[in-house]
Image (cartoon, rainbow, N blue to C red):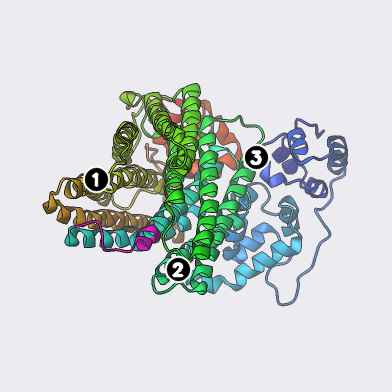
Amino acid sequence: MKVTKDSKVLDILKGCPATVKVFHKFHLYPFRDLDSDLGAVASKDGAELEALLREINVAVASPAGTDKAVGAVPGRWVHQNMSLRLVTTRYPETRKVFGRYKILELAEEHWPDEKITFFAMGLHLWPDRLVDELNEAVEGSDVLEAGQGISSGPEDIHVKFIKVSILFALTTGCLYGAGILFYFGMNGALAGVPRAMLEAHGHTQVYGWVGLFIMGISYFALPRFWGTSLHNAFIAAKTLIPMTIGIVLVFLSRHLLLIGNYTPFWVMAVAGSIMEVLAICLFIYLMAKTYRSNTARKFEVYEAYFFAGYTWFLIQALVFVGTLAYMAYNGLNTIPHLTEQPMLHMQIMGFACMVILGILTKTLPVFLGIKEPRKDINLYAFLLLNASILLRVVSLVLGETYPLFQTVFLAAGCLESLAVLLFFYNLRLHRIGEIESGVPRKEFRKFIKAALVWFLAAELALLYFNISQYYTGTEVSYALFGAYRHAIFVGFITLMILGCASKMIPMSLGIQLYSYRALLWTFVLLNLGTLLRVTCQPLATDYNMTALFLPMGLSGFLEAGAIFLFGYNIWKTIGQKQTQQQGTAERITVVTPDTNVYHLVKQHPQALDVLVNHGFKQLKNPVLLNTVARTVNIGTAVTMHSTDLGSLLKELNEAIK
């Protein structure tokens, strides 16, 4: 065959596996760009195209082995001369190594008899390194089998992040906050607890619950949105370690400092915050590299929401490091007012809400069965929202010194409300259900709808607060503003997280959620707890309705109960996947809306032609088939191309018979 700049990388490797040596020589990563043209790959990685073409065609004209055979090494199970088929058959535990590099299914389909050296070159690894990893997997198989049973490969990195985020929510997050709130309720006042404890609770909620959850979902969802693989899944999995240690150190040190203003406790606090910054920087770097790995795709507005949210997350983390250093130098144990409010706003609106709006922009048209929002209006909303966050942060810092910034503060609030209303209008929620026919399991939708209602109500309240403060010169009460913040953080952010997770996690594992009854009670308890907190707190404090302190105090336990049910549900769902992995896959005999696309095509290859004829041409790409298709069932797939579900099911069932 004659290779040109328009030849696909996958076709080149399939036609002549020996060309992998040429890719390796030019420092190219063929397994990462299998569906790309050779010219695009050379341009992206700065390789000289003419020289690359010349050497590839020489290799094609006189094919040779991928490398000189390397014999067995005494005391080692795997060596370079062994084929993938032999290694994975003799030592099944090595499959997780190939899976971590995102090539297992692809390798088994196209090159099962190629030697280990071939795959090392395709991954741009030294063969000895890949062999070492495979042997470590064999040596540690007994330990791994005694563990959780879930690998750390790119397919399930998000599972560990979500598990740890739930643990934080159930301990130092919701349950800890519920205890404090109950104390307030029994005490009949929002007082009696050191402010440092409240700040530590808030920190673990933002970083441990929301932060880790968003990092996990980003690792899972964005590479699939972008039609590529996660850049360096191994490092991505390791970012969980510094983030978790940092959160724990900050939480513990803030409480230990209540004992005394001792230097080791401050070292713990600052070191923990620096570890958080390190984890966030690595996370942003990996997501940026993943985004740039697919040069053929065009920019979409939802991506701007994600990266703006990540940027605000990093900025506020850096501000937090500086604030802790300032507090240590001056012997303070509470965050100064000058930085507290700006940080909170960057955390809630800049990070959490920005990322969630990005998720909504990308997934809501499919999840709720609505038409795609207009991109130009979505871009205007994005620009207005970021301008409002910047102006609000600046005005919070300078407003007490320069009266002019009080007007800027009002303008920022108005811009934020305008941006949110514009975003809501553009979603066209009144047209929900236009194309929802055949989509299975819609229970998650109530979470998203309720979250949007809480968000809209909170933003209208904030607009009223801003106008009132500007004209009266009096800030709203701590209780009232706290109620607003709770409506945003729990009513919007947490409800949205639970709703998206109840859809994405089972979908990513290719199974159903363990209990939809538990999901319903999660929804009821969380909304009831939020309603009691938001209404009772200002009424009990500002209007002397002291009888409402008790239901306010109990509201936290309702919310904690909701998070516990959600955590139990997710844990059992993941457990179902483990059991499924240990057994054999169920044979598909009838195609329904719940049938997983990947399993259907793998069991019945003839179904691929039917799907392609109905518009799913991307399934011809083996990388997308082995990634995105794993997370999609037939019912969801038809919403992506507005395909008639009935006719598709009929043709698929005829094909598999």
Q: How far, Cα to Cα, is label 1 from label 2?
A: 30 Å
Task: Answer whether residue 287 is magenta in the image.
Answer: no
Quarter of image, res 130:
bottom right
| x and y, in percent, of residue 17 in the image | 76, 47
Lower sequence index among marks 2 and 3: 2
Residue at x 81%, y 35% (from the top left corner): 1
Is 264 above or below relative to 57? below
Q: Residue beneath label 1, please?
A: 534
The image position of residue 377, as x and y in percent, is 47, 23
Which of the marked residues, 1 or 2, is nearer the chain's N terminus?
2
Q: In the rendered structure, which amino acid carries the disc numbered 1?
A: Val
Task: Find out whether residue 196 is within the magenta segment.
Answer: yes
Marks 1 and 3 close (CB-CB < 8 Å): no
Q: In the rendered structure, which amino acid carries the disc numbered 3?
A: Arg
Please identify the quadrant where the C terminus is shown.
Answer: top left
Of mark 1 and mark 3, the one earlier in the sequence is 3
Residue 580 seen in the figure? no
Q: Is residue 261 visible?
A: yes
Badge 1 density bin: few <14, some 14–19, many ≥20, Cα 10 Å? many
Say which residue label 2 marks: 253
Helix, strand or loop at mark 1: helix
- Looking at the image, residue 637 sits to the left or right of residue 127; the answer is left
Question: Disc 3 designates what residue?
Answer: 292
**What residue appears at the point 53 percent right and 39 percent down from the top-left corner?**
308
Q: Secondary structure at mark 3?
A: helix
Choose between 654 and 361: the one closer to the eye: 361
Q: Is residue 523 above or below residue 382?
A: below
Query: Which portion, as a residue range, is magenta?
Result: 189-200
